[in-house]
């Protein structure tokens, strides 16, 4: 898979490495790019995206899939909101397949699969789950369980057979794999590195992931993501109209 | 394919939902809801909520994850955002129902088809009216990805997704047993821009039986 690097070679304006089952949330403004790099093989990053100004607008799984006639995410596809607009574009991707239909682990799954080791027993090696991690970070922005929707599972691959039965593909992401999300709107990003809910690995083992944010160039008319589908071109126009009306 | 032994004569509730209309109704734990595709190839866009906690609502991804399966049919447990079983599909003469395609909206119609489709009636507007009929304080924030009963959205092993002609036919039905008190909101889909309704939206009928 070719890597497309659209950001300037300047240093990242923000860098953070998530260790353990790392949680993170931040508003990343339009024009910036978030690069996520798997520092270990087998990483998974669960991600939810919201319009930072009006968070009732959020990443929408069905519109993202049906607008682009896809079942999984990769460059040059876009992440659509539920308002006909683009929250972010996948501008670089060394992986080629990211799940977005399988959702997040919860406390029951983590207890069943890994034992549910608590903080008292393991200190900061305790076992978090993805749903609670989402809710914890959402709460810091005035949101909560009411705002849970199907998330991205970056770096993870799940395939379907003709009957719709799903299989998790192990050893999908390698150490050093990366994906870049260029934000087309000011976006609240909520993420964690809990394992994929269908990962059959019996070991509780969240992988380290590095986050970097870069300032990127304005999107040109010939942008690969914008041009990847006529639906995306129209969603970009919708996004630009929204921003033109909102900004001074 | 699983047929039901329930007779419409013993139903405690019957209602025909015209195409383009919302419908909101509480289904008590143990009651059975049947949705009938009266004329065939109609998409019934459906949401479920815990009747006592609207933040605990149907979740497409939790349902897919729990079953490790994309399509819904007899035996599928409908799972909520908080991991609870809301209902179980107990009969199905259609064979396959979608939960990836979501609902149409006037906004997504501009993205999917063209800007001049924006005026056309769409499921999300019906959903907004449908949840308001239950609790006026609810809004778009409370409307997650739904089930499309009778709709066929096949995914290929290489990851393509298409909207295919329905596998449903006149009189096909799906039946669900409520595992807790739930509120059901249906938008009987008005979409005219793709084959989900065979370009001809038609009524669906809903029936409820006591346990």
Image (tube, coloured by chain):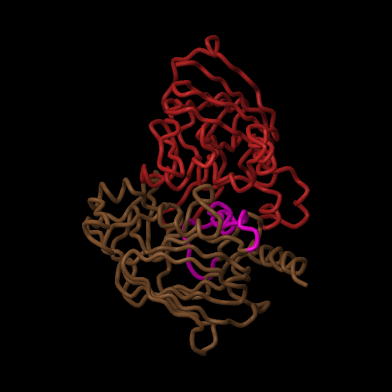
Chain colours: A brown, B red
Where residue A77 appears, as percent x and y from the top left, is: 54, 66
Magenta highlight on residue B103: no
Quarter holding the N terminus of chain A is bottom left
- Residue at 45% over, 28% down: B180
Where residue B101 appears, as percent x and y from the top left, is: 55, 47
- Residue at 26% over, 51% down: A116
Work out whether B127 lies above or below B108.
above
Instruction: Determine which quarter of the picture holds residue B110.
Output: bottom right
Q: Along the line of sight, which residue is nearer the eye, B132 or B9?
A: B132
- Residue at 49% over, 62% down: A190
In this picture, which residue range is highlighted in magenta? A53-77
Where residue B190 appears, as percent x and y from the top left, is: 69, 39
Work out whether A97 lies above or below B154.
below
Instruction: Determine which quarter of the picture holds residue B185.
Output: top right
Looking at the image, can residue A188 be seen? Answer: yes
Work out whether A95 lies above or below A63.
below
Looking at the image, can residue B92 be seen? Answer: no
Magenta highlight on residue A71: yes
- Residue at 24% over, 54% down: A117
Residue at the bottom extreme, as displayed: A10
Magenta segment main secondary structure: loop
Where residue A199 appears, as percent x and y from the top left, is: 30, 56
């Amino acid at each position: 898979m070719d890597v497309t690097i659209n950001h300037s070679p300047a240093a990242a304006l923000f860098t953070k490495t998530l260790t353990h089952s790392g949680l993170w949330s931040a508003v990343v403004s339009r024009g910036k790019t978030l690069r996520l790099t798997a520092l270990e093989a087998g990483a998974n990053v669960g991600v939810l995206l919201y319009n930072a100004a009006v968070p009732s607008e959020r990443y929408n799984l069905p519109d993202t899939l049906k607008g682009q006639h896809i079942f999984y995410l990769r460059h040059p596809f876009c992440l659509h909101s539920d308002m006909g607009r683009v929250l972010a574009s996948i501008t670089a991707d060394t992986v080629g397949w990211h799940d977005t239909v399988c959702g997040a682990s919860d406390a029951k799954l983590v207890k069943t699969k890994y034992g549910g080791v608590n903080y008292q027993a393991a200190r900061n090696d305790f076992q978090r789950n993805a749903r609670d991690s989402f809710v914890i970070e959402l709460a810091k922005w005035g949101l909560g369980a009411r705002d849970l929707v199907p998330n991205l599972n970056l770096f993870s691959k799940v395939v379907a057979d003709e009957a719709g039965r799903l299989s998790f593909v192990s050893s999908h992401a390698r150490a050093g794999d990366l994906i870049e999300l260029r934000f087309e709107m000011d976006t609240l990003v909520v993420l964690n590195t809990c394992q994929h809910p269908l990962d059959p690995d019996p070991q509780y083992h969240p992988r380290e992931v590095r986050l970097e944010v870069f300032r990127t160039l304005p999107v040109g008319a010939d942008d690969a993501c914008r041009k990847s589908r006529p639906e995306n071109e129209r969603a970009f126009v919708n996004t630009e109209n929204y921003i033109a009306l909102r900004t001074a | 394919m699983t047929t039901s032994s329930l007779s419409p004569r013993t139903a405690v509730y019957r209602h025909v939902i015209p195409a383009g209309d919302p419908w909101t109704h509480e289904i008590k734990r143990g009651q059975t809801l049947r949705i009938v595709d009266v004329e065939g190839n109609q998409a019934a866009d459906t949401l479920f909520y815990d009747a006592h906690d609207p933040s605990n609502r149907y979740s497409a991804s939790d349902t897919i994850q729990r079953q490790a399966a994309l399509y819904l049919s007899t035996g599928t447990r409908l799972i909520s955002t908080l991991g609870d079983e809301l209902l179980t599909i107990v009969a199905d003469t259609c064979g396959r129902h979608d939960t990836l395609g979501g609902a149409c909206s006037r906004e997504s119609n501009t993205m999917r088809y063209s800007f001049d489709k924006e005026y056309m009636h769409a499921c999300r507007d019906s959903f907004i009216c449908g949840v308001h009929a239950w609790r006026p304080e609810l809004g778009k924030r409370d409307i997650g990805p739904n089930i499309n009963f009778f709709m066929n959205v096949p995914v290929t092993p290489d990851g393509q997704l298409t909207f295919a002609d329905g596998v449903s036919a006149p009189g096909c039905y799906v039946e669900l047993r409520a595992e807790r008190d739930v509120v059901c909101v249906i938008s009987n889909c008005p979409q005219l821009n793709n084959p989900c309704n065979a370009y001809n939206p038609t009524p669906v009928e809903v029936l409820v039986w006591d346990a």
